[in-house]
Amino acid sequence: NSPGLAATVVAGVKAGKPDAEIMAALKQNARPAAPAAPAAPPVPTGPVQISTDGAYVKGSPSAKATLVEYADFQCPYCVRAVPMVQQVLQKYPNDVKYIFKQLPLVSIHKFAEPAARANVAAGLQGKFWEMHEVLFQNSRALDDASLRKYAQDLGLDMARFDKDFNGPAVKQTIDKDVAESQRIVVNGTPTFFVNGYQVPSLDIDTLSKMIEAARAGGD
């Protein structure tokens, strides 16, 4: 018998507890512990390496601070983050370059991946940011018919859009962003990084402090 069970018996006898109460305590102590939940992957303390090759940039291309967002067009939290990004770009017009990475959460958002494809396909016709804005403005209407309407409204060549939307190049671009997000342990959307350091709190004050540190030449 384990020392823990023996101690339970001794303590019960000394306290003058009835046998039934001592036996109940023994059964309680003898229950196996619940299995521990699998450990989550460690979140890097940073900085992580994020590719900017071929990325669409908003803001100043030569800025010292690079703000990268991994997001999903159907994610309500990503929609709420849009004004914050706009505020940052207005506050630091010459000090921030903003890069958007596709991270459609396909297991919970049915229309996120098609929306990502529409964004990348529009980018091939020079309308990445215009489509990006429209998709977030219409995050509850991302079915295929709506996506084609947005493309038409932006004046895109629809034959080319349809071909690109369903083509391998667009899929490869999204797959590359998703694979990168897994490598650097992005666990949800939206997730932001400033110069490779994950932003711990999604508020304008935290973002501003990190941007100002990067602008000053720090990390």
Image (cartoon, helix red, strand yellow):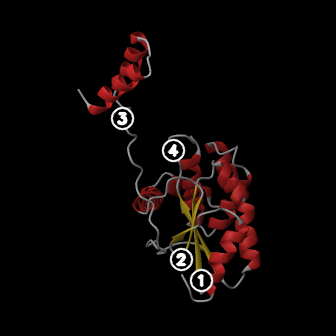
Task: Pick whichever of labels 3 and 2 is earlier in the sequence.
Answer: 3
Give me the C-alpha separation between circle 3 and circle 1. 43 Å
* Residue 106: mark in rendering: 4
Q: Residue at x 66, y 84 (%)?
A: 95
Q: Residue at x 55, y 66 (%)?
A: 124
Residue under pointer 1: 214
Front position in the image: 73 or 189: 189
Task: Pick whichever of labels 4 and 1 is earlier in the sequence.
Answer: 4
> Could you tell me which quadrant the N terminus lies in?
top left
Q: Is residue 58 above or below residue 130?
A: below
Residue type marked 3:
Pro
Mark 3 or mark 4: which is in front? 3
* Residue 35: mark in rendering: 3
Left or right: where 137 falls relative to 37: right
Residue under pointer 2: 195
Q: Secondary structure at mark 3?
A: loop
Residue type marked 1:
Ala
Task: Pick whichever of labels 3 and 1 is earlier in the sequence.
Answer: 3
x and y, in percent, of residue 146 in the image: 68, 46
Give me the C-alpha separation between circle 4 and circle 2. 27 Å
Residue type marked 4:
Val
Locate residue 216: give its quadrant: bottom right
Give me the C-alpha separation between circle 1 and circle 2. 7 Å
Q: Are marks 1 and 2 in contact (CB under 8 Å)?
A: yes
Task: Pick whichever of labels 3 and 4 is earlier in the sequence.
Answer: 3
